[in-house]
Image (spheres, helix red, strand yellow):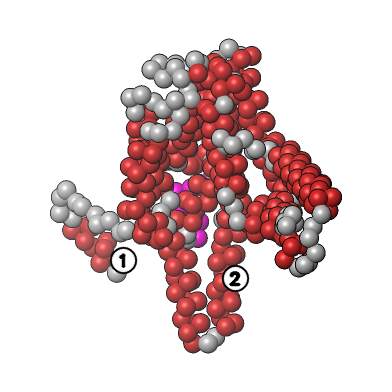
């Protein structure tokens, strides 16, 4: 639809350039006969009718383009000029816009619209029906949404911890794979690769399931877009201007004291630190020093965002922080099935105390008697 709309606009501009209104005195340049008043009046009337036809056709084309725009706006869920996504769609190139329209045809935007309607309904239900207000209602809806993804977060951390316990064994197998690959022994390298898969399957490690944690990103984007739309369109829900609490009564305006952005930066930094203490991959070790600066860079940007955004980010990040810190507790790890050392691994062999038969010497309080010495000599 978007591509057809752009093609129609180009076609309209081509037609406008191709149309030339006739000049009333053009016949004098090609005819030596003098033009009579009747002929001049006829030519002038023809020019008037041609101009009227031209403007009528132009108005019809504009009306058709307007109807097509309305149809596109009905198909896309975010059509407000103040919406970030709609503004982004308006500046897309033609090919990219065509891709976006194709995605809309296959139902992605309908899914996003469904998420938007669901989360907004949760927010307003907590705010109005439960009497929490827009501020506390946003916290409640974000906590409920985060609770839905809590199993995926927990499983992702379980996979990360088990992978960390398997790291010495995997490093040895990977070294063997590289050596066999350099020697050209593909069969041996394939066997080593199968060992890695078997070892992961034995200990219940399925990395693909932990990838479901990525689905939190569309949820964050939907919440951010919803908050952005309500912050700029007060008529949709005027309660957002007055239903805040503490020092931020207006959820659509930035925090006047900058406390919420600072809290969001601190919670984000604690999340990064907690992640680095639970599961650290070699790639994360290299990127750690750069990741630490992300909250510091984000705080000045968040100071320009609505207070509702910072409130949502803090409440959502706190749940993540609590889950990450639970994994630092040994009892919680055992409760969810993550032992201190995986059986059959190198770490278990290195940290297991093996029982040794130690012969303890005998101590005598008094020297042995002659009878005892004779008994020992007879025994030998």
Q: Quadrant of residue 359?
A: bottom left
As drawn, the label of residue 250 is: none
Q: Main secondary structure of the magenta part?
A: loop
Q: Is residue 175 above or below residue 258?
A: below
Residue displayed at 43% across by 51% down: 279
Q: Residue at x 70, y 36 (%)?
A: 114
List the residue tagged with mark 2. 194
Q: Quadrant for the C terminus, please.
A: bottom left
Circle nearer the N terminus (1, 2): 2
Horizontal side of 183 relative to 267 (left or right) equals: right
Q: How many marks?
A: 2
Q: Regarding mark 1 in the picture, which secondary structure is present there?
A: helix
Distance from Cα at disc 1 to Cα at disc 2: 60 Å
The residue closer to the viewer here, 97 or 240, is: 97
Task: Residue at the far bottom: name it.
Answer: 184
- SS for dot 2: helix
- Residue 136 visible from this viewpoint: no
Residue 66 location (% of width, % of height):
73, 41
User: In this rendering, is residue 43 above or below 127?
Assistant: below
Image-quadrant location for residue 140? top right
Q: Residues within 10 Å of mark 1 (few under 14, many from 20)?
A: few
Q: Nearer the viewer, mark 1 or mark 2?
A: 2
Which class describes the residues within 10 Å of circle 2: few (<14), some (14-19), or many (20+)?
Answer: few
Q: Viewed as shown, does residue 214 lie left or right of 51?
A: left
Instruction: Residue 105 in the image: state x and y as whole percent.
Output: 75, 49
Could you tell me residue 83's position as x and y percent? 57, 37
Boundaries of the magenta span:
338-344
In front: 55, or 34?
A: 34
Residue that carries the numbered disc 1 in the rendered image: 379
């Amino acid at each position: 639809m978007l591509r057809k709309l752009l093609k129609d606009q180009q076609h309209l501009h081509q037609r406008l350039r191709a149309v030339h209104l006739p000049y009333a005195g053009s016949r004098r340049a090609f005819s030596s006969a003098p033009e009579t008043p009747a002929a001049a009046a006829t030519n002038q009337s023809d020019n008037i009718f041609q101009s009227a036809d031209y403007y009528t056709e132009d108005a019809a084309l504009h009306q058709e383009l307007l109807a097509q725009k309305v149809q596109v706006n009905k198909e896309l869920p975010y059509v407000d000029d103040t919406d970030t996504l709609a503004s982004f769609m308006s500046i897309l190139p033609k090919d990219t816009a065509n891709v976006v329209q194709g995605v809309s045809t296959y139902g992605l935007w309908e899914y996003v619209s469904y998420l938007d309607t669901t989360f907004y309904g949760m927010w307003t239900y907590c705010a109005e029906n439960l009497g929490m207000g827009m501020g506390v209602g946003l916290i409640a809806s974000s906590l409920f949404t985060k609770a839905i993804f809590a199993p995926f977060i927990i499983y992702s951390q379980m996979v990360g911890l088990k992978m960390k316990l398997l790291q010495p064994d995997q490093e040895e197998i990977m070294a063997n794979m590289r050596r066999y690959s350099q020697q050209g022994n593909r069969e041996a390298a394939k066997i080593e690769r199968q060992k890695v898969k078997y070892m992961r399957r034995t200990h219940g490690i399925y990395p693909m399931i932990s990838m479901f944690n990525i689905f939190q990103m569309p949820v964050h984007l939907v919440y951010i877009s919803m908050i952005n739309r309500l912050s700029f369109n007060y008529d949709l829900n005027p309660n957002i201007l007055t239903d805040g609490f503490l020092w931020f009564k207006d959820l659509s305006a930035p925090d006047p004291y900058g406390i919420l952005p600072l809290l969001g930066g601190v919670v984000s930094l604690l999340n990064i630190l907690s992640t680095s203490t639970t599961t650290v991959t070699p790639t994360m070790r290299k990127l750690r020093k750069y990741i630490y600066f992300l909250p510091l860079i984000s705080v000045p940007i968040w100071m320009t965002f609505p207070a509702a955004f910072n409130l949502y980010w803090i409440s959502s990040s706190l749940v993540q922080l609590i889950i990450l810190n639970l994994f630092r507790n040994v009892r919680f790890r055992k409760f969810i099935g993550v032992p201190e050392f995986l059986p059959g691994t190198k770490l278990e062999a290195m940290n297991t105390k093996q029982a040794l038969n130690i012969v303890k010497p005998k101590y005598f309080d008094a020297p042995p008697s002659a009878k005892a010495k004779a008994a020992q000599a007879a025994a030998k």
